[in-house]
């Protein structure tokens, strides 16, 4: 399994999130690229030194998000990801480009030497806060083939956060997961309703029973509720590692160290 080859384990993989500062051209952009890159690399080093299993890099501060992601975002995120790869030469690294810029994420990952992307809108349509988002699996995986990036894994959100799923209210999360598996997803991601909101442990159990591909929890895991999610193949954690548990705040090294120690103790 590609997931095992990448992370060296099949369960309870911990992936830390780097929320890149607002990029040039976005409403909140106010920092030089050198400063943005330096901050991302500082956080990457914290994760690396705490013994985390992987890192994902995301342009979370580029609010409000747009489906029209410009070349400046792609070029700036490529620069950031390349710098983070130099800091973490052997750590599994991934990228997500908001909003739903999945082909751009693949291109950035290929250029930067990253290992995976997180993709929105892989199967079924939904209404996100940016607007209507349609499925992209066919176009995305054809693009991956065309650019020679088959080695880059595509982990896909299902029934994703910050979205309305009334359009597919007759399709369960298990059916959505099976559809993603059928459409060649490398792993599915389940979340709560918003960033930092706990995913439903029952949904995790149901999805794990429904598919043979990896299942990753993409929001709301903390030191206090970790026990509910250890059966997941992976856990993407950002907000919990920040000051006050808020995604926009500074990364706290002690929280990362404490989390990794507790996971080790629980898995003994």
Image (cartoon, rainbow, N blue to C red):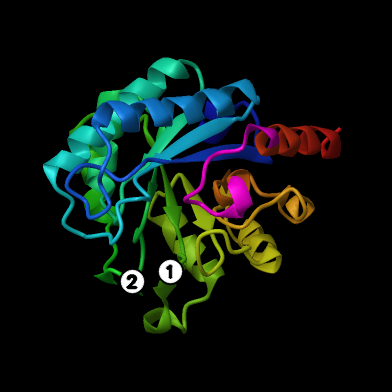
Residue located beneath label 1 in the image: 162
Q: Any mark on residue 129, and which?
A: 2
**Quarter containing the C terminus:** top right
> In the image, is 137 to the left or to the right of 256?
left
Task: Read off the magenta span.
Answer: 243-254
Q: In the depicted view, which residue is nearer to us: 241 or 10?
A: 241
Place of residue 213 in the rendered image (x, y in percent of width and height, measured from the top left): 54, 48
Q: Per the image, is 263 magenta?
A: no
Q: Residue at x 27, y 58 (%)?
A: 136
Q: In the depicted view, which residue is nearer to us: 211 or 246?
A: 246
Place of residue 98 in the rendered image (x, y in percent of width and height, measured from the top left): 31, 52
Place of residue 59 in the rendered image (x, y in percent of width and height, measured from the top left): 34, 46
Quadrant for residue 228, please give it.
bottom right
Q: Residue at x 15, y 40 (%)?
A: 72
Q: Residue at x 61, y 53 (%)?
A: 245
Label 1 element class: loop
């Amino acid at each position: 399994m590609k997931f095992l080859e990448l992370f060296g384990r099949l369960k309870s993989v911990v992936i830390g999130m780097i929320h890149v500062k607002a990029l040039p051209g976005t409403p909140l952009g106010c920092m030089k690229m050198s400063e943005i890159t330096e901050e991302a690399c500082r956080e990457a080093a914290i994760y690396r030194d705490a013994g985390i299993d992987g890192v994902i890099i995301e342009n979370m501060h580029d609010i409000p998000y747009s489906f029209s992601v410009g070349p400046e975002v792609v070029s700036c995120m490529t620069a950031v990801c390349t710098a983070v790869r130099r800091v973490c030469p052997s750590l599994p690294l991934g990228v997500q480009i908001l909003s739903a810029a999945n082909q751009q994420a693949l291109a950035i990952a290929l250029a930067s030497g990253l290992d995976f992307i997180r993709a929105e809108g892989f199967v079924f349509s939904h209404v996100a806060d940016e607007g209507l988002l349609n499925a992209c699996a066919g176009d995305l995986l054809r693009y991956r083939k065309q650019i020679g990036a088959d080695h880059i894994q595509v982990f896909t959100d299902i029934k994703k956060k910050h979205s309305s799923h009334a359009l597919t209210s007759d399709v369960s999360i298990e059916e959505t997961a099976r559809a993603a598996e059928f459409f060649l997803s490398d792993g599915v991601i389940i979340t709560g309703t918003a960033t930092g909101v706990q995913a439903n442990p029952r949904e995790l159990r149901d999805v794990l029973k429904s598919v043979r591909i990896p299942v990753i929890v993409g929001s709301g895991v903390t030191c206090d509720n970790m026990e509910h999610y250890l059966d997941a193949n992976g856990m993407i954690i950002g907000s919990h590692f920040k000051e006050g548990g808020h995604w926009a705040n500074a990364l706290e090294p002690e929280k990362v160290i404490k989390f990794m120690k507790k996971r080790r103790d629980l898995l003994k």
